[in-house]
Amino acid sequence: MGSLVDRVRGAASVLDYLNLLLCLHYLRDAAADRFDTLTARARALSSLDEAAQLLRDVGRAADEDMRGLGVHSSMQEALGRLEPRTARDLRNVVDAMSRLTEDVFGLILDEYEQRAALGSGEFFTPRPVVRLMTRLACSEFGPGEPESVYDPYARDGGFLIEAMAACALDKDGLPRNETLRTYGETRRADTWRLATMNLLLHGVPPALDLKRTAPWHDGPGQAPLEAFDIVLTNPPFNMSDPGREERRGGQWTYGAPPLDNDNLAWVQHCLAKLRERGRAGIIMPNKAGNSSHKAERSIRRNLVESGVVDCVIALPAQLFTGTAVPVSVWILRHPDNPCDSALFLDARHMGVKNGSRRVLSALDAESLLDAYRAHRNMGGAALPLGTTTSEPHVAAALVSREELRRSDYSLNPLDHVKRQSDGGDGFEHELVSARQQLSDAEEHLRDIQDAAARLPFVGDHGPLLRRNQLASMVSLDSLCEIQAGPSYSKLGKKQRSTHGPVPVVFPRHLKDRRINDEADERVTEESARRLRNFELRHKDIVCVRSGAIVPPALVQQHQVGWLMSPNVIRLRVPEGQEDRVLPEYLLHYLCLDESVAWMRDRAAATAAPSLRSESLGSLRIPLPDLAKQQEVVAVLNGLDELDRAHLSVAASVRRTRIALAGALLGPSTEPAPDTFLRHRFEKEAPL
């Protein structure tokens, strides 16, 4: 996915190039002999005409193999649009794909999804979410069970693949005699082809039909089975407010959905396809859980009263590429095996940032499964109704049918977990914690204020003098070493992740003259050793190289060993200059408004705004003697500490206000808040 993308695609789209990678990877596993023949031809390429013919033959080979399985494919046409610059470029792509030993099909699909900008009807379901839903749906089946699984809106085939893997063994831990039967339906031809490839590469029979209409319009006999043990799906979201017109066609056990919103139509279709003891997992927008529309409320009432709602999990935001809509996982059961309560789990805070998306970790999934088992009495004592608990990182509420009636049949976890966790002891504990934090912050502020009052030039200590009027002016590069960050080829996206022990510093991490500890981009120890020339040391200064120019930041002791990103520049005072200049003095001068404006001006002078090391090194710095530098540093550092202390108090006041508002206005108020207020405002001196 580097420079070869543009070198091979020419005027064609990136999607056509991704189709080439998918075809090569598919042929390598599904038609090894043909793939070996094609790679041998690729090694012998010597002209662009031969390269064009090879591309057509790769597409034809994939098409023929897919058509033999009943799947219409047009990869030859897509690959025929590619225009490699040289035969060597295509040879390099084929060679690279032939040497990959891991299953990269999922990674290519991720890239395809982002490049194609797939909407809510087409984007793929993140694999950690697929795994979580499959394990929840399978949790009540024993070894050797279930027998069948169905996805009525198969996107990339992920649910069918995961279900096959989860149900592969019998009670003795041996491969099952009877293979799990799988069936899926999809609505889009290009994702149908990709899903079929994906299923075949994972050893799953590609029983996948391309349908043009919604599945509830099908008559009897349209699916290989009329009912399934497990139904798993991520249907297209419909976030528009339903109109008033009622849906007249179809058979709806729980009530006719609104005519122009299919959210609860999908829910009813999944339930209709369940066998007795069957279970379904479906992704729904949060709005479907508490919509005030008359028809949707009526459907939720019937779902609750029938006991088919087992569990609802609020997922974190930004899990999906194609939508920012907040969503939940609904776990449903067959009405012949009802439950008297619904479990609500709040996982909105889970996951880690990976670029613009969040990713659920294996630990997150295990925590959610543990919370589910604990509440559903699977291997332990059942928890009382109405209790809210926190398994590791999971807030949960087990809500009775009567409580659901009082909530107007809301199936949105935010209407249950938050309300219960905000009552009684939760508020009291939060108030006590907030009070202690505020008291500590105020005490620290008083100490800092006392110290700041003794600083020169602060308060009434005589007139302020221009301390640098007689200082000599020197260039920045005569005082420190200036090092730009590594190139993108050395530290690009493929070398970084949200995991790894060594953080990487980007411009967004520079704030208030410090590097924040967000550490959302990291590298492995091996990468850090390879890039040790770009390590940061204590009191190094980090400036922005490319992007919006902001004031620089000073490296703290605990940030030693972190790496520079390609977007920053490092300033380091060498040993020979330590008796001449203080790093903190340089930092404060570089943070002056006029210094930042100077850097912005120099960065804007290039075609792509960027601050060159040579330009930064030419900045003229007034250099007083070391004693005067120490005096300046002491004053400005002291005021920085005072600034941070005030911010800490302000944050503590905000936290206290939120906790107190919840206690006073929430569903369960106690006399504790009044006691807290009386104690808080009887202090000696208000802020």
Image (cartoon, rainbow, N blue to C red):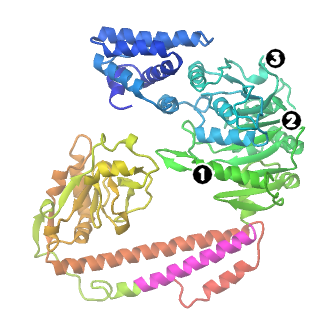
| Labelled disc at residue 86 | none
Q: Quick one: label 3, few (<14), some, or many (20+) residues within 10 Å?
A: few
Q: Residue at x 35, y 32 (%)?
A: 2
Is 48 displayed left or right of 417 in the figure? left
Q: Quadrant of residue 236?
A: top right
The reply to whether residue 80 is in sight is: no
What type is the residue that disc 2 sits on? Answer: Tyr
Span of residues in magenta: 423-448
Is residue 425 found inside the magenta-colored segment of the image? Answer: yes
The amino acid beneath tag 1 is Leu
Q: Quadrant of residue 6?
A: top left
Task: Judge the density around disc 2: few (<14), some (14-19), many (≥20) Cα neighbours within 10 Å.
Answer: many
Q: Is residue 477 above or below residue 557?
A: above
From the viewer's perspective, is 460 left or right of 113? left
Front of the two marks 2 and 1:
1
Dot 1 falls on a residue whose secondary structure is helix
Give the residue at mark 3: 219
Q: Does label 2 or label 3 sit earlier along the sequence? A: 3
Please indicate whether residue 414 sits to the left or right of residue 52 in the image.
right
Q: Are marks 2 and 3 in contact (CB under 8 Å)?
A: no
Q: Residue at x 45, y 24 (%)?
A: 18
Whole-percent x and y of residue 132? 66, 43
- Main SS category, magenta section: helix
In the drawing, what numbered circle is on residue 254?
Answer: 2
Sequence order check: which comes first, mark 2 or mark 1? 2
Magenta span has 43?
Answer: no
Disc nearest the viewer among 2 and 3: 3
Question: Residue 296 location, x and y as percent?
Answer: 80, 39
